Amino acid sequence: MSAPSELHTPLLAWYDAHARDLPWRRTTATPWGVLVSEFMLQQTPVSRVRPVYDEWIARWPRPADLAAEPTGEAIRAWGRLGYPRRALRLHAAATAITDDHGGEVPDDHDALRALPGVGDYTASAVLAFAFGRRRPVLDTNVRRVLARLVTGVELPPPAVTAAEKAAAEHLLPDDEPTAATWSVALMELGALVCTARSPHCDECPVHAACAWRSAGHPSYDGPVRRGQAWSGTDRQCRGRLMALVREADGPVGPRTIIGAWPHDAQRDRALESLLADGLLVRTRDGYALPD
């Protein structure tokens, strides 16, 4: 592995020149804005997140603003981002921040981890990007960059390993603000250059130190990675039912629900799962978003 200091200067210079102007990265972004972005960006591309994020922050600039609203409003505002349980968890996190932390996003790892919907990755990302802390941030893009740069393999293992955490920690600059910028620079490199399918190695600022490039770009030979199907799945059915209720002015009747999906058993299964998740509620007239 190259000495960390040999990698810092070229990657940080590249990031300074090529970083996208994203609202949650601006100096005006609040810790709450960073937390909202991390919830929204889970398994969702930036292009889909950005308009929803802008509307969300304009409507609910503080955790207390969201906490004061019914959970159904959070689900409605989530729109078509997918995985709407994230909206419920973000609403619950806003409530916890308001009730337990005086309305301010905590700057402590354990306190962040205690918030609904916040795992180790999100807590580390908030500490790094909102508070400028020296924390390794291992999202999909960063893990792929480090797998290639350090380990010499095309793709990382399915789950984060201790070795990955150690490598990420080893590469962090000592200075906290610089370490935070390094973390987001790695993320940006994975998003724009060291992409999963068609990496632009000739544009990479650290290609000379890349173990994968030096090895001749060997193909991934680990466990088979299966993409998530969509058409005809329970996820698609759930999404269609959610869109139907979310866009309605009032409760949606059973007859309308039946007409939304042709397969009875799958539709009933999806509907029951939405009710169990708290994303929909039964009313006298049919189904609606929760209060």
Image (cartoon, rainbow, N blue to C red):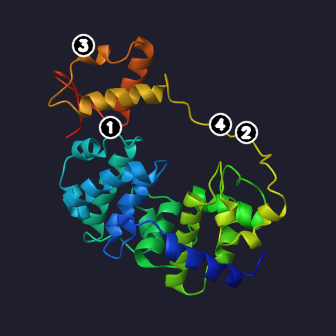
- Residue occupying the far bottom of the picture: 175
Q: Nearer the viewer, mark 3 or mark 2?
A: 2
Residue 151 rendering spot, x and y as whole percentages: 77, 63
- Do the residues bearing badges 2 and 4 touch, measured as CB atoms within 8 Å? yes
Residue 51 rendering spot, x and y as whole percentages: 31, 52
Going by the numbered disc 1, the residue's amino acid type is Gly
Q: Give the distance between the C-alpha atoms of the residues marked 3 and 4, in whole angstroms.
A: 36 Å
Residue that numbered label 3 is attached to = 255
Q: Quadrant of the C terminus?
A: top left
Q: Residue 224 has which mark?
A: 2
| The quadrant where residue 182 appears | bottom right
Callout 2 environment at 10 Å: few (<14), some (14 to 19), or many (20+)?
Answer: few
Disc with the residue nearer the chain's start (3 vs 2): 2
Q: Residue 278 has which mark?
A: 1
Is disc 1 placed on a helix, strand or loop? Answer: loop
Q: Give the distance between the C-alpha atoms of the residues marked 2 and 4, in whole angstroms.
A: 6 Å
Q: Give the distance between the C-alpha atoms of the residues marked 1 and 3, in whole angstroms.
A: 21 Å
Q: Give the distance between the C-alpha atoms of the residues marked 2 and 1, in whole angstroms.
A: 34 Å
| The quadrant where residue 145 appears | bottom right
Is disc 4 placed on a helix, strand or loop? Answer: loop
Q: Is residue 157 above or below residue 261?
A: below
